Structures are given as C-alpha cells and as structure tokens.
Image: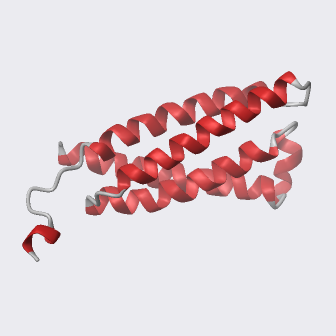
Amino acid sequence: MNTKLIKIAGFLSAFFGLLTVFAGGSVIFDLFGMREIEGNYVPFVVWANLICGLLYLVASYGFFSRKDWTGTLMKWSLWILVAAVIVLMVWIWNGEPYENKTIAALGFRILVTLGLLWVANSIKKKFPIDAVL
C-alpha cells in the first residue's frame, strides 16, 4: 500500500477523531451551549459518534505505526455506526424528534469509515517484528 495514502488516512483519522470527540463531548456535557445549537439531537447517535471518535484517535496511531489491529478498530466503528442507523430508523418510525442533518452526518461518517477501513485492511508489513522474534 502506498505510504502516502496510509499517512493521509492517519491524519484524516486523527482529525476526524478529534473533531468528533470535541463535538460529541460538547453535546453530551452541554459545553458551549451545543445542545441548544444542535436542536433535536439523538442521544444514542451522539454517544455512538463519540465512541467512534475515540476509536478513530487510536486508529490514527495504528495507521502511522502500521499496526495490524487498525482494521479491527475501523470494523468496530463501522458496526457501531450501522447499529446507530438501525436504531435511528426505529427512532424516526416512532415519531421521535430528530434533525435531517443527523441522517446526512451518519451517512458521511459511514463513507469515511469505509474508506479508512479499506486503507487499514491494505496495511501489510514486509517484515513484521513478530516474525523476526
């Protein structure tokens, strides 16, 4: 895999993770009046995003150091987001309040996670340290 692409994925994962942890934490803990700004936020989606943000931050280290477990973190993030989408559909069908931007943001986040997962699964080490020891 192209080293430049892996570095880009690492930076994207770190940036996306920091942004997500800041935004999600701000809504959860009502920092800077974010709850009012967000409107009809969906609590479990915010928590899912926060957890994924933390996974993105750890995965950024995995990208830069080319760890094999980076793909596993991205898979967990993807499954968490898919579960959030399923629960959100039930939430919407039950007539609960939500914002249209929540649907768009989840879709975008899933696409980004799929891209990061693709790069993470492409990381191959020619000489893994485990093989040497």
- Quarter in which the C terminus is drawn: bottom left
Vertical placement of residue 109 versus 63, above or below: above
Give the number of marks. Answer: 0
Does residue 19 show up?
no
Vertical placement of residue 3 versus 85, above or below: below
Please tell me which residue lies in front, 86 or 114. 86
> In the shown orientation, is residue 14 left or right of residue 87?
left
**Residue at left 81%, top 57%?**
32
> In the shown orientation, is residue 42 left or right of residue 67?
right
Image quadrant where residue 95 sits: top right
Q: Position of residue 84 (x, y in %)?
A: 68, 38
**Residue at left 75%, top 26%?**
89
> In the shown orientation, is residue 25 left or right of residue 109?
right
Q: Position of residue 57 (x, y in %)?
A: 48, 59
Vertical placement of residue 11 versus 40, above or below: below
Q: Position of residue 60 (x, y in %)?
A: 40, 57
> In the shown orientation, is residue 95 left or right of residue 75?
right
Q: Position of residue 101 (x, y in %)?
A: 72, 28
